[in-house]
Structure formats: C-alpha cells, structure tokens
Image (cartoon, helix red, strand yellow):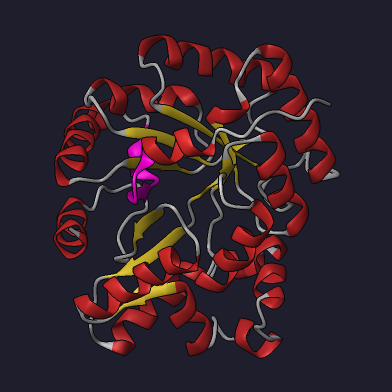
Amino acid sequence: MSESTNDGNTAKEAVGRYGVWSVGLRSEEPALRGEIAEAAAELEQLGYGAAWLGGSSSARHALPLLAATSRLAVGTSIQSIWQYDAEESAAAFAEVESAHPGRFLLGLGVSHAKLAEQYRRPYSALVAYLDALDKAGVPAGRRVLAALGPKTLELSRDRAAGSVPYLVTPEHTARAREILGEEPLLAPEFKVVLKTDPATARALAREHLAMYLALPNYTNNFQRLGFTEDDLSAGGSDRLIDALYAWGPEDRIRDRITAFHEAGADHVALQVIDGGDRNSLPRDSWRRLSDLLH
C-alpha cells in the first residue's frame, strides 16, 4: 500500500463553499436527461460550486452534467465499492477525465451491511480498493471518502483528497477536521427542510430519517456524538431531528449551514427534503437556497 500526497486544496478550489446533493441528478431515465442538463446549467448559474450525485453512482453518471456546464464540479456521494469493482471504476474515471479534465471527484464508500450482500471487513475492503485504484492510475487527489469514524477519516487524509461525510452535525465536522488536519477537503452533506412550522418540518424530516435509523453505521455515529437510544427511538427525538435537519426561517437555516463552516467544513453539500420523490429535481428549492446563501 502506498501513501500519497494529499491534494485537498485543489479539490477545495473545484467545489467552492456550497453544492447540492441529489439522487435525481444521477437518474438514468432517458426522459430526464434534458432536464438534468438544464438543472446542472442552472446550478452553475446560481453560484453552486458542485453537484453531488446521491445513491451509488458511477463516474459516467456525471457526464451529462459536465457536458452541460463549464465550471461546475461533479462528484459521486457515494459510489459503493461493492457495486462497481475498482477496474470498472478506474475505466469510468478515465473516460470522464478525458472528456472533462479536472472537474470530477470520485466519492467512494462502503455502503451498509443491509444494502450490500458482499459487505465484509469494510475497512480492509476499502483499503484494497484504493490500492487497486492506485495501480490503475486514479489520482488520490481526485477521490474522496464517505468517512464517519476515526479510522476512515485517517484514510481520507492519507489516501484521498479528503472526506464527504453524510448525515452528520457540526460537532462531527469539528472532530473530523481535527483528524484530517488543515489541507484535506471536508465536505459534509446537510439536509434542509424549507418549512417554518416545527411540526410540518419535523414530520418531513422523520419520514426521511426512518431508513437511516435502521443502518448501524449511522446510529453508531449518532451515539459517538452523544445521542442516546431514546434519541434514536420513535422516529428520532426532536433533539436528533433538529441536529440533522435545518428548518425554520431563512436566517435560522443560514446560521445552521454556517455552523458547519465555522466547525471546519470547506464545503457543504445541501440536500433538500420536501417529502417528494427522491428522484425529483427540486429546482425551485435550489433557487431559494441560492438566494439565501449568496
């Protein structure tokens, strides 16, 4: 295994301070290709630095977005190491890099035991995957890892450009920055509910959180952050919901996002939660967020 020089500063320049996280942007539906391209172009015009493709996306899912834009960075958040083998991943990366040099970040993760039948010794499997990418010529400075715990954060520091943690808090960001050090990219995902009524906002958040409360990788991380079994029961306590989702008036949402930057994040990937289809493109909400942030 070879350690490589971190190129987090280059990644930071590529993604800027804000991006959007969306499953819909990775859709393979032919009827949506035009809308995805239009949405990507608008995201660039709105001032977002990056689009993160939710779900287990491959590099090739980035091609329509990159072709429709000139500056927008596109990353996978994340590509499961169990779904695409390293050789396939390297070939897709090379294809995208040839067409759009320097604008794609390969976000990798180990997914979850309940979602991947092959799930075994995830940390060792991730190390072996990175070894294979090294051999295939995928630069460490162009890949990022979905890291929650200390060991994988250290791997993000030593074998990648940084980390793209999902479903975290500013407190996690502060801990992650301590482990990563100053140079690597730290780009947490954060969920936004553009509702001001507490009951409505929390209901939407709980509906969205339900699937994640069944995944130990996340619940273990919540407990490392000080949440209790009571916080994880009955769909999540108000304390847990309010830590993981920004809702309320615009100034409150802005402050919640700013808290990640103050804790050490370089970039925040914003996911809109509105109760709609996960594969939809919430373009009106992205416009509202842009007005709020810029």
Q: Quadrant of the C terminus?
A: bottom left
Q: Position of residue 262 (x, y in %)?
A: 43, 68
Q: Is residue 290 above or below residue 84?
A: below
Left or right: where 130 falls relative to 246 = right
Q: Is residue 80 visible?
A: yes
Q: Is residue 81 visible?
A: no
Magenta stretch: includes residue 22: yes
Q: Which residues are magenta?
A: 15-27
Q: Quadrant of the N terminus?
A: top right
255, 264: nearer the viewer = 264
Q: Measuring 43% from the left and 27% from the top, which residue is drawn there?
A: 104
Residue 274, image quadrant = bottom left
Residue 50, image quadrant = top left
99, 59: nearer the viewer = 99
Q: Measuring 58% from the left and 43% from the top, which residue is drawn there?
A: 162
9, 126: nearer the viewer = 9
Magenta stretch: includes residue 167: no
